[in-house]
Image: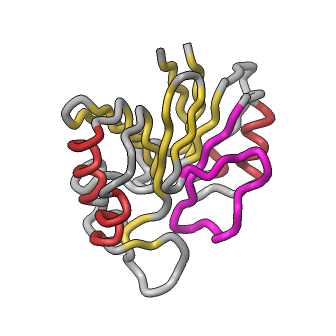
Amino acid sequence: MLRIVVIADDDSRVGKWDGREADLLLSCGDLHDLTIERVFRSYRCRRAFAVRGNHDSDGPFPVGVDDLHMTVREFAGLRFGGFRGCWRYKPRGHHLWEQDEVSTLLRSFPAVEVFVAHNSPRGVHECDGDVHQGFEAFLEYIERARPRYLIHGHQHLDRETRYGDTAILGIFGERWLALE
């Protein structure tokens, strides 16, 4: 059983250590690097994978935190991949994408079991059609690659939705998962 702690979007809602330990930390963005490091240490995680959100810096993650953006990493027999940022809702900022840019980038992205993103798929967990518009390319990726999970932040909600064989998990704050 793989114990995973997933964090996203609100530094004050994560890392309330209760004695549990996690094998893996997944960060879905819009968190300070110090928060990611604190959660990693508190839960005694063996590995940490992360993507940046639209409110994050453009710098590298701290040593020991693997950036999943457009990369595949393996851990405990599972393949993890990811995508940072959100829809370009403003003219300037880090990690902002046009819909067609994301489609082009993900067109040949390999299949993974767990896809970690900051943004949600288009029409899934969106809290509005402007700042929080999801990516159509994520739906295309799910249909082509069939990941077991797509885990995202950005929408400031905790919700689970199925899209075909994929469980789409929206995370706000902290959530624990146990994967076989």
Q: Is residue 52 magenta?
A: yes
Secondary structure, magenta segment, majority class: loop
Q: Is residue 126 visible?
A: no
Q: Residue at position x 47%, y 63% from top?
A: 85
Look at the image and say whether residue 104 sits in the magenta stretch: no
Image coordinates of residue 123 in percent, x first then y, are 22, 54
Could you tell me residue 137's position as x and y percent? 27, 58
Q: Nearer the viewer, residue 22 or 155?
A: 22
- The relative height of residue 13 versus residue 34 in the rendered view (above or below) is above
The foreground one among 146 and 32 is: 146
Q: Which residue is painted at 77% across and 54% down in the image?
A: 62
- Above-or-below relation of 145 to 89: above
* Residue 156 vertical placement versus 100 (above, below): above
Q: Quadrant of residue 56?
A: bottom right
Query: Is residue 10 toward the left or the right of residue 124 in the image?
Result: right
Give, as a single range, the part of the protein colored magenta: 47-68
- Image point 39% across, 45% down: which residue? 110
